[in-house]
Each structure stands twice: as C-alpha cells, then as structure tokens.
C-alpha cells in the first residue's frame, strides 16, 4: 500500500529558528516521485520540489533543504532561519504509477 | 510572467446541477494537473493531461470528466453535483525538461454546492 505520513500536525517556532518537517512514505514501487508543496493562509498551493526515487542527492535552495533517504523512506524538509512568511501548511506527496498520495500536512507557524 | 489562470474563481451551484471549471496553463507548458481540496483536507489528485492526452487518472468521480484542448487549456466538467463536491479545485501546469519538472498552480476555483 502507498502511504505518506506527516506525523507533525502543527509546529510553532520562533523567527530565525531552524525547523524540520518530517515526511515518511511507504511504497513497494521502485520508481516513484516525492513532492513538497506549501499552502500559505491565502490558500494557494505552491510547488516546492519534486524528487525521483533514483536521485538521493540532497538539495538546497536558499533557506530550504531536503534530505531524501531511501533507507528510512523519508523525505524531510528543513527551513533554515525561519521567517514569518514561512507560516503555512506544508504537504508532502508521493506519486507512484498514475496516483498521487498526499500527507495530511504540517501546519507551521513562525512567531515573530 | 504569465501564470496559470483558472476561471471562475468562485462558483455556487445547487445539487444535481453541472459545473465547468477552466484552466489556462502557462504558455508552452504541456502538462495540466487537476486537484480537489475539501475544507481542511489534503489535496486529492484528480487527473492530468500531457500533450492533450490523458496521462494519469486519480480519484476522479465518474460524474466528472476533463479534457485538454488544442490550445492546451483544460476543462473539468462536473455533473450531478453533490454537497460533497464543495471544495477548492486547483489546476497546475508544467513543462518537463528531462527528469526535471516544476508545477505551477493556479489560484484555484472555490466551488460551493448548496
């Protein structure tokens, strides 16, 4: 069965702190894609990253970084030096075959 | 820069009516995705198109259909609307470059079924 688990429902951090959002996935497929999306309070969805299962190289984009570890089936997302504008719900998703599986989201609040 | 356009932005319908949502992808994007997000829920993938052909099909009800036209815009047709269809419907477009793909989302259409 395919599944995405975001165990952290809500996280609050103080501005400038680092925060890691966890994502654990389950699949028996060898080819799959992992995604992170951001949904700020305004409601729009913002695509952050797509990673395929054959590429375990970690990625950094500005204050964002992603740690993909197949050994633990995890695709964690770290925000460095968090800012108030980072406050949003973050969704992790898995795509296998023709199906997307979303986690239930982590609501991040960055306190000024 | 041009973004993904969705119309209408808001729509109110009654049960058993039909609705058509439109999505205009970013120019030169070849792929369109449709997602449904109920209140307080995570997004659900409905369907996607690549080069005007259906590429992936997710949890799209049989009452819904979609297509992508020659100008790459896409329409999601919803019939026999139910109260549970009330949701935010997102469209996203992308253009694949080898193994790389970035999805760009529209602002969403908020559908309320009364």
Image (tube, coloured by chain):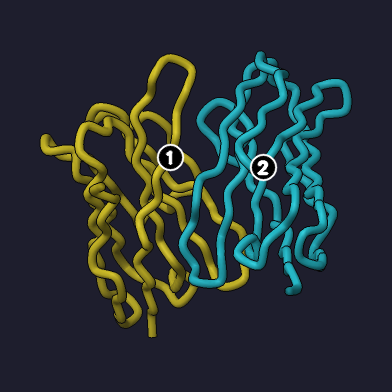
* Image quadrant where one finds the C terminus of chain A: bottom right
Drawing shade for chain B? yellow
Q: Nearer the viewer, residue B114 or B93?
A: B93
* Image quadrant where one finds the N terminus of chain A: top right
Q: Is residue A87 above or below residue A99?
A: below
Residue pointed to by mark 1: B103
Query: How many neighbours does mark 1 have within 10 angstroms: few (below 14), some (14-19), or many (20 or more)?
Result: many
Q: Nearer the viewer, residue A101 or A87?
A: A87
Is disc 1 placed on a helix, strand or loop?
Answer: loop
Residue pointed to by mark 2: A64
Q: The cyan chain is which one?
A: A
Q: Is residue B20 left or right of residue A64?
A: left
Q: Are marks 2 and 1 on the same chain?
A: no
Chain at numbered mark 2: A
**What is the x, y in percent for residue B98?**
42, 14
Q: Residue at x 55, y 43 (%)?
A: A48
Q: Which residue is drawn at 49% across and 42% down?
A: B58
**What is the x, y in percent for residue A88?**
63, 64
Q: Is residue B58 left or right of residue A56?
A: left
Q: What separation in Å lies between label 2 and label 1 (alpha carbons)?
A: 17 Å
**What is the x, y in percent for residue B36?**
47, 58
Is disc 2 placed on a helix, strand or loop?
Answer: strand
Q: In this view, does B90 lie above or below A75?
A: below
Chain at numbered mark 1: B
Residue A106 occupies which quadrant of the picture? Answer: bottom right
Q: In this view, does A18 lie above or below B29?
A: below
Q: Which residue is drawn at 69% across and 15% down?
A: A30
């Amino acid at each position: 069965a395919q599944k995405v688990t975001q165990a952290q429902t809500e996280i609050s951090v103080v501005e400038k702190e680092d925060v890691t959002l966890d994502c654990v996935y389950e699949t028996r497929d060898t080819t799959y894609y992992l995604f992170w999306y951001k949904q700020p309070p305004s409601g729009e969805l913002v695509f952050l990253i797509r990673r395929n299962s054959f590429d375990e190289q970690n990625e950094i984009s500005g204050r964002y970084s992603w740690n993909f570890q197949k050994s633990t089936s995890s695709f964690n997302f770290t925000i460095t030096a968090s800012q108030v504008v980072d406050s949003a719900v973050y969704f992790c998703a898995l795509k296998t075959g023709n199906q997307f599986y979303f986690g239930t989201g982590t609501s991040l609040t960055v306190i000024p | 820069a041009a973004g993904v356009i969705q119309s209408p932005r808001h729509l109110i319908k009654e049960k058993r009516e039909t609705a058509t949502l439109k999505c205009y992808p970013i120019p030169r994007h070849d792929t369109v995705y449709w997602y449904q997000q109920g209140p307080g829920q995570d997004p659900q993938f409905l369907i996607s198109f690549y080069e005007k052909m259906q590429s992936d099909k997710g949890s799209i009800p049989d009452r819904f259909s979609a297509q992508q036209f020659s100008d790459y815009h896409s329409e999601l047709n919803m019939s026999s609307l139910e109260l549970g269809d009330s949701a935010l419907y997102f469209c996203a477009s992308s253009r694949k470059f080898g193994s790389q793909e970035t999805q760009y989302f529209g602002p969403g259409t908020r559908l309320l079924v009364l």
